[in-house]
Amino acid sequence: MGRLTVILDKMTDLKDTDGALNHPDPYVIFHLEQDNWALDKNYGKQTSSVKKCTCNPHYNETFTFEDVKSLRNLELNIKVYDEDWGRDDAMGKKNIKLEDLTPGEETEFVEKLDKDGKGLFRASARIYLKVKYDEE
């Protein structure tokens, strides 16, 4: 068993989904799972704070997933949303395979966000993370 720590540093160049007089209020949902073809293991989801009126939010927030069995087939699914009244707008997503992490070492990721369905999206948007897996 182990612990996976994710540090959300920032995001850059998000699409301005709310128009010229308002900027997006972005937040991130992390979902960790072990993709074992038929017997997936779900380690839960965690949500960042909402950053008001910005296309370039800074977070410096840490998320911890406990009792992670191994790095084998481990995947971090990331979804970015704009908080709105009613339904939140999808702004992008990214799936990161983690099985090549070296236990005990922090790895930096700068990832291009992918389009999430019909969500509002900018191809140059990036998410900056640090990820570390510690075996117990």
Image (cartoon, rainbow, N blue to C red):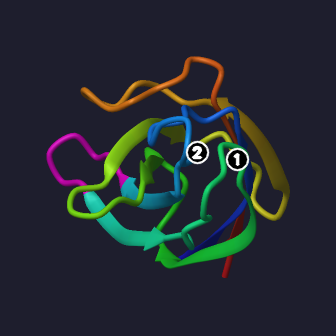
Q: Is residue 66 above or below residue 100?
A: below
Picture quadrant where residue 56 is located: top right
Outermost residue, front side: 21
Q: Which mark is residue 129?
A: none
Residue 91 shown left or right of residue 71 in the figure: left
Q: Residue at x 55, y 30 (%)?
A: 113
Task: List x then y, in percent, for residue 93.
Answer: 44, 37
Q: Is residue 131 visible?
A: no
What SS does tag 1 mark?
Answer: loop
Q: Which residue is mark 2?
A: 98
Question: Which of these two is toward me, 72 or 49?
Answer: 49
- Looking at the rendered structure, the kind of residue marked 1 is Leu
Q: Position of residue 28 (x, y in %)?
A: 50, 58
Q: Which residues are magenta?
A: 34-40
Label 1: which residue? 101
- Quadrant assignment for the C terminus: bottom right
Indicate left or right for 135 with 23 as reference.
right
Relative image position of residue 125 (x, y in whole percent): 63, 29
Q: Identify residue type, mark 2.
A: Leu
Residue 17 drawn at (x, y percent) = 45, 37
